[in-house]
Amino acid sequence: MIKRETIDVDSFRINSDLLENVCNPSPYLVVLILSTFGAKEERNSIRNTWLNSVWTNLHPNFTVKHIFILGLKNRNEELAILHESKIFKDILSSNFIDSYENLTLKVLIGLNWINKNCEHTKYVLKADDDTLILVPNLLLFLSQNVHIERIIGHVVESGVVNRKGRWKVALDLYPHKIYPPYVFGNSYVIPRSLLQSLITASNYMPSISTEDAYITGILRREAKRKLLHHPGFSFWLQSTKMTKKPCKLSKWIVKAMIIVAVFIFAILFMWHKFYSRKIVSHKNFTLNGDGKRKTQDERYADYFILRKNKINPFTVNFTSMNENLCDGRTYLIIIIPSKVQNSRQRHAIRSTWAMTSSALVKHVFLVGYSLNTSWNDNIRKESRVFKDILQGDFVDSYYNLTLNILMGLEWSHLFCYNATFILKADDDTFVNTPYLLHVLQTNVTFDYRGVIIGKLNKDGKVRRNGVWKVGTNSYPFPHYPNYMFGNTYLVSRNIANRLVKASEYMPYLPIEDAYITGILAKSIRTKHQHMNGFTFWYDTPPKACDFVNSKRITATKLSPRMMEFIWGKINSRYPNC
C-alpha cells in the first residue's frame, strides 16, 4: 500500500485549559461538535441545553465532556475567540479556512486530538452544531452494549457519489459510483479504540470533502471496521423535515423530555436495586453479604484488594534508541521523568550526577509525546545523539506522570534484568550517586530486597482541589497509606513488574508517588524502608558541603547551574568545606 501526501491532522493549537478540562481525567464519552467562528449563539445554546451538566453528570462512571472545533482564518479571529475559550475551556481551534471543503480535515483533527489526549475515553460522539442529542438515552444504550466495536449511527447502504453540486467528488479522488456503507454525518458514535486505525487509513486514502462518506465509509472499510445501524440517530432529510414543522418538533421535544424523566427515575431505581445486592462496590464499599454496613476500617482494607478484572490495561508503547543500555554489570538504573522541552535540565544531569565513572550505574530519561511538533522533532534528535531517552506514546502531561513512571519500571524490568535497584529521580533533583552507590553496596541486607526506599511520608492528606486533586470516586479516603516522597526514591527491581501489573487492577491516580509507592505497594504488600538523606518536596535548599560531607543523598528544586556547582564541589580536591 502506497502512503500518500496527506492532510495534517496534528495542526491544532495547543490549549492546556482544554486538555485539563476535557481529558483529566478522561470521560466515558467525548462529544466533538463542529462549529464555526460566528456560531457563538449555537455554542451557548448547546452548553445550556443538551450538554448542560445536569445531563452530563448523571452517573460518575458515565461522565460526558465536549469539544467545539473550529477553524480560525487570522489573528483577529484568534484573539476574538480567546475570551470565550478562557471562560468555557471547551474550544479546539486550528488555522484552516472553515469551509465545506475542509470539513473532513476538521473532523480528523478533532478525532486525532481526542485519540492522543483522552486515552481512557470509551466513546466519541461527533455531532453538528444544529443537532439535538438526548444524552441520557445515548448513555443508556452504550452502557447496555459495552462490547460494541463498531461505528454507530444511521447507516446509508448505497450512497450515490455526486459529480455535481455542493457534494461533488472528482473522479480522480473517488472513481466509483457508489460509496461503501457509511453513517449520516449529523451525528455518529465511534469507539475510541477505532480512532487510530481510521487516522492511519487517512494516510493512504485520498481525502474528499464528503466527511461522513469518507471517514465512516471509505476509511472505515480500509481499516476493516464495521457499522452498527441505530434508527434513533438522525439523518439530513429527517432533520430538514423536522425544522419545517416546528409544532411537530416541539411535540417531539416534549415527548423526549418525558422519556428523559422516566429514564432518570429508572436509573435511580436500578442503582438502588443493584447496590442493595452488591457485596463489594469498588466505589462505595457500603454493604457486606448480610446487608450490614461495613466499618471504615473494612472499607479501607477492601480498597487495596486487587480487582478481579483489569480496569486499567497497561498498553503503553515506548521507543528507545538503546535497548542495550543496561549490561550484565548494571547495579543501579536511574529513571528520570522529564518534560520534552526540558533539554537544559537533561544536559545538566548528563554532565553532573549521571556522569558517574562507575559501570554499575546507568540512567534513562522518560518522556511522553508533546502537542508541539517541533519539540517532538528535537527530542528525537537528542535521543539519536545521547541514546538515553525512552519515549512513550502518551501525551506529556501531569496527569500522565504516573503512566510515565510505570513505563520506566516496565522498561527496567524488561531490559535491565541484572540491576538490583531502580532509582526514580525528577529532572530538578540532584543525586550524590557515588555516595548512594556506597550506601547501597555497604549497607544492603536481605531486608532491602523487595522494598521501596526513600523519605517516608506518613498519613499524607488527600487533596480534593488544585493540581494534586483526587476525586472521591477514585480514592474515597482522607489519607493515603504511607508512601515515599516522589522527588527521589528507590525500588528494588524484583518488584518493578509486580507494581506495573498491580496498576492494571487498581483505579488510576495521577499522584505518582502516593499511587505507586503507597497504594500499589500496599496492594502487593511491599515494605517501606526510610533512609536519611533523601529529599522531599518542602525540603530546605541544599548546601554543596552537605553532599561533600555525605550528609545528603538527594536534593530537589535545583537549577542546572546549581547542579553544576554542587558537582564541582563534590569532585574538587579542595572543596573548602
Image (cartoon, rainbow, N blue to C red):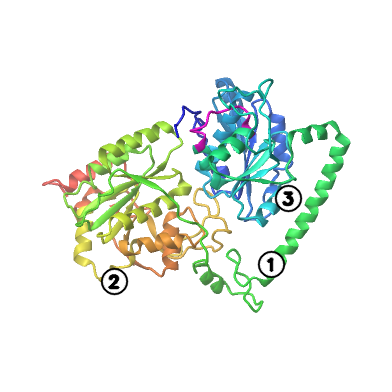
Measured as percent of width and height from the top left, residue 214 is found at: 60, 33
Disc 3 to disc 2, C-alpha distance: 56 Å
Q: Which stretch is magenta?
A: 201-212
For disc 2, the marked residue is 447
Could you classify mark 2 by the number of other residues whose Cα lies within 10 Å: few (under 14), some (14-19), or many (20 or more)? few
Spatial CA span between label 1 and label 3: 20 Å
Disc 3 marks which amino acid? Answer: Asn
Residue 275 located left or right of residue 2: right
Q: Which of marks 1 and 3 is nearer the N terminus?
A: 3
Residue 469 coordinates in the image, percent (x, y): 52, 52
Q: Of the residues shown, which amino acid type is indicated by label 2?
A: Asp
For the residue pair 519 and 310, the one nearer the viewer reads as 310
Mark 3 near mark 2, Cβ–Cβ under 8 Å?
no
Neighbour class for label 1 at 10 Å: few (<14), some, many (≥20)?
Answer: few
The N terminus sits in image quarter:
top left
**Residue where numbered disc 1 is placed:** 274
Question: Which residue is painted at 29% across and 52% down in the image?
Answer: 334
Marks 1 and 2: CB-CB under 8 Å? no
Q: Nearer the viewer, residue 178 or 114?
A: 178
Q: Mark 3 points at which residue?
A: 137
Mark 3 lies on a secondary structure that is helix
Which image quadrant for residue 176?
Answer: top right
x, y (%) of residue 218? 58, 35
Q: Which of marks 3 and 2 is nearer the N terminus?
A: 3
Vertical position of residue 306 compared to residue 392: above or below: below
Q: Does the magenta stretch include residue 534?
A: no
Outermost residue toward the left in this view = 573
Main SS category, magenta section: loop
Q: Distance between the residues labelled 1 and 2?
A: 45 Å
**Disc 2 on helix, strand or loop?**
helix
Q: What residue type is labelled 1?
A: Phe
Give the side of residue 530 with respect to residue 27, left or right.
left
